[in-house]
Image (tube, rainbow, N blue to C red):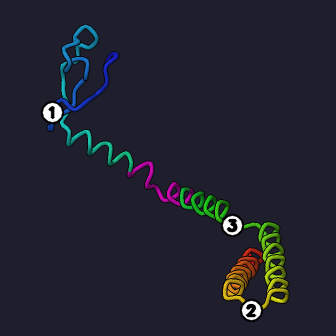
Amino acid sequence: MGVGSSSPKNSVSYGCSSHTNSRDVFCTQRGTTERTRVESKVVSGIKERLLDDSVVGEVAREIRRRDRRDTKPSAPTTKKSITGIDRQIGNVVDSLTAVGWSEALKSRLGDLEDEKEQLVARLSIVDSI
């Protein structure tokens, strides 16, 4: 096809873009190919090569592997987060002892306890993987 590329000549066929754009010095191929024929060959090539069971299985395995790698929290990081939450809970309890009852401190303590509960649940999942 020379230096040109194949491009839609119209909605029905494809032809060399150099020839289509009046650059006959680059391409002397005046032929065109029906769009439906090209699309049919492309789709059948995809089905033959990419939808083969072994290829699909390998792609699925790779996606699962990457998903586990990207979403799997590490046990050391989760344990470090739990330690930080425990320290914050201790600080809130100390504040309650020193200052007395406070809705803001009560709310913060509840939030920290909820966060710790989620981290402990995540840690049990991480340990089971």
- Residue 113 tag number: none
Q: Quadrant of the C terminus?
A: bottom right
Q: Pointer 2: what residue?
A: 101
Q: How far apart are the alpha carbons under marks 2 and 1?
A: 78 Å
* Percent position of residue 111, x then y: 67, 82
Residue 94: quarter of image: bottom right
Residue 9 drawn above or below residue 2 = below
Per the rendered image, the range of residues in magenta is 47-58
Q: Residue at x 72, y 81 (%)?
A: 112
Please state which of residues 5 and 108 is positioned toward the viewer in this rendering: 108
- Residue 10 tag number: 1
Q: Residue at x 34, y 16 (%)?
A: 3
Q: Residue at x 38, y 52 (%)?
A: 47
* Percent position of residue 125, x then y: 71, 78
Label 3 close to label 2 by CB (< 8 Å): no
**Residue flagged by tag 2: what amino acid is it?**
Trp
Disc 2 or 1, which lies upstream in sequence? 1
Q: How far apart are the alpha carbons under marks 3 and 1?
A: 50 Å
